[in-house]
Image: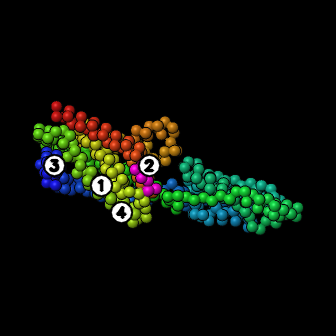
Amino acid sequence: MDAIFEPILSSHLWALILKETREILRNKYLLFLLLVPPTIQLLVLGGALDPQVRNLSLATVDHAQTKQSRDLVAALVSSGVFRDNNYVTNEEILSRQLEKGQLNVGLVIPSDFTNDLNRGKSADVQVLMDGADAYTAGIASSYVLRTIHEFQPDAVALEPSLANLSRSSTNNSRPQAQSLIAPRIDILYNPGQISSWFFIPGILGACLTLTGTLVASATVLRERESGTMEQLLMTPASTWEILLAKIIPLVVFLMGDVCLAIVAARIIFGLPFRGNLALFLIASALYAFVGIGMGMMLGSICRSQRQAQLASFFINIPLILLSGTVVPLDTMPWFLQTLSLADPLRYYTLIARGVILKGATLAMLWQQLLWLALSAMLVLTVSANRFRRQEA
């Protein structure tokens, strides 16, 4: 064992790793930036990002004033999408409230609503949506239309001929239709459709990107501002040894962040972990190399930490938006989906969700893992070239 570890412990790389680790432990700001913000961001964003629409405001103008009209409103309110219903007297008030943004949905029930139902006719209602928030309006309109389509009034007194037709239809047609189609929907991997389970794996990658980039650029710029970078470049150590010595301690600290975040998400959000932990940590380490490599590159290009912070946000925000972390890839235009193929966070998000939620194995994820490794090698190669230019 001594023959194996002795060359490593006596190498320039090991000495530089110890030096960088001591620097990080002495720097309270960097230590705080490494440990605290990623976990807090994960927990806050995991709970805040929720694609499900709830607690919308609804107002109704009910000209019918019958049990059937009240049952329709109750069917809309009962699911929790609408927090309550406010009855108003006329369409003018309804329009004014929509214009002021006080309502999301307005419903107008005509006076002949119940009479049309009694005659077996289609009863018209008017639904008004506030389309300023297009996403909310789309979800709300789909829900309202589905609820109205499925609405079955209880106490409608049909005319005799229509009642006989309804009974014969019930006795003859409906059982046959039900026997032909009996759908059963099973939602796999996330049966409760908990939104935090979808977002947390991607947000973890986004936190690794932001933290790795900011911390790595800060360490390089600190060395340059204090004048110790020139001393490092004049040591017998090679450029790769200097670069790896700065990256490896940061990767170790970020892996601690990953484990802490997974435990916190398990406790607070009940996030399952169905896959192989080693595979997940390998993917996380590779992506940490990507984020830290980008930070090293920015630190060698920018002249101050403020410039590096602005540049990192200019790079990281498109990476996060194109990765499928916040917006599903399938909803993007085709040219953005094509552009996202060059985004390493896309592959980490796919790996993290596959391992955590589906229990995916290496045989299922080797392509994404390969692209992630190639991205890490590319970023580190560019960073090493920048270091060589400083040395020259």
Give the image location of residue 340, x and y in percent.
43, 40
Q: In this view, does 152 lie to the left or right of 217?
A: right
Residue at mark 2: 364
How many C-alpha atoms fall within 10 Å of the one at disc 2: few (<14), some, or many (≥20)?
A: few
Residue at mark 1: 255
> Which amino acid type corresponds to the residue marked 3 in the rendered image?
Ile
Q: Outermost residue toward the right? A: 161
Residue at mark 4: 263
Q: Give the distance between the C-alpha atoms of the residues marked 3 and 4, in whole angstroms.
A: 33 Å
Which region of the structure is painted magenta?
A: 358-365
Residue at mark 3: 8
> Which amino acid type corresponds to the residue marked 1 in the rendered image?
Met
Residue at point 23%, 55% (across, down): 31
Give the image location of residue 41, x and y in percent.
36, 56
Does 362 appear in magenta? yes
Depth check, mark 1 against mark 3: the one in front is 3
Q: In this view, does 123 lie above or below 78?
A: above
> Which amino acid type corresponds to the residue marked 4 in the rendered image?
Val
Q: Quadrant of residue 225?
A: top left
Q: Is residue 261 left or right of residue 168?
A: left
Residue 31 visible in the displayed image: yes
Residue at point 22%, 44% (across, down): 244
